[in-house]
Image (cartoon, rainbow, N blue to C red):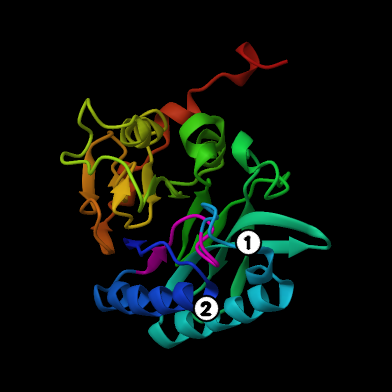
Amino acid sequence: MRIALASPQLPSNIAESLYWLEKLTKEAAASEAEIVCFPESFIPGYPFGQHTGDERTPIQLQLALDKACIVAAENKIALILPMDWYEGNELLNVAFVINQHGKVLGYQAKTQLDPTEDNIWIAGNQRRLFEINGVKFGIVICHEGFRYPESVRWAARQGAPLVFHPHAGGSNEKGTLLKEWGSMDNPYYEKAMMMRALENTIYFASANYGMKYPDSASSIIAPDGTVMAHGIYGLTGIVVADLDLSKATGLLAKRFKPETFYT
């Protein structure tokens, strides 16, 4: 399977989100990727303080999802589309899966919120797998994949050779422009990506925004922990890699003995 990760600019409203959605989806489709994954809370954009509730109404979010379905169908590519989403009166941080025909297959809600997010979203309470073109995969969102490795291991133990990890880390306002992927001077996030793949013997595909000062690059990690492809710090674009799914055996995940750790 060929997959793509999108690294758009951090949008400030839904219109900007949809602009980058269409542009980068077309690029991913042109590369012959079967799936493209966008960063966390891509519609309307992760709320680093610049968004208001007026940009997150149920009607606006539904219209944006409808547009994304059209983009997927027109480009014949599946989308992993992180959004804010209402279930009743509760606002969730989710990642929708839309197949190449524009059909919504469902979503994974973020079940482990960062403490700074408790006043933004309600945590989800269920994990699930999805399937595109015969390939099963899980989705873990930002904080989950970095600090709750159990979320990735769950998917691997359910038979998923691939886990997508939309996240949001960095700033356009201040910070240090990273120079070398995985450097000892970088934040720990890229090392965590390597571990999520290596400790489960699966592929791990992590998508971040193309911010000026990112905490990490969008990256695709092989089951042995090696970096297959990554984005360029501070730039927008896509990252593409071909996955040999026979190498994603899930061996280490399957050898886990939960009975010795949990009661």
Residue at figure coordinates x 52%, y 50% from the top left: 139
Callout 2 amino acid = Ala
Q: Position of residue 28 (x, y in %)?
A: 31, 72
Is 58 magenta? The answer is no
The stretch in magenta equals 34-45
Q: Main secondary structure of the magenta part?
A: loop
User: In this rendering, which labeled residue sits more in front, label 1 or label 2?
Assistant: 1
Q: Which residue in the structure is indicated by mark 2?
A: 68
Q: CA distance from mark 1 to mark 2?
A: 14 Å
Q: Nearer the viewer, residue 137 or 118?
A: 118
The tag on residue 84 is: 1
Q: Is residue 211 above or below residue 254?
A: below
**Vertical comparison of 56 with 137: above or below:** below
Left or right of 120? Residue 191 is left
Q: Is residue 81 visible?
A: yes
Whether residue 149 is visible to the viewer of this picture, yes or no, is no
Would residue 103 appear left or right of 184 to someone viewing this image?
Answer: right
Which of the two residues, 119 or 102, is positioned nearer the viewer here?
119
Give coordinates of residue 98: x percent, y percent. Answer: 54, 71
Q: Amino acid at mark 1?
A: Asp
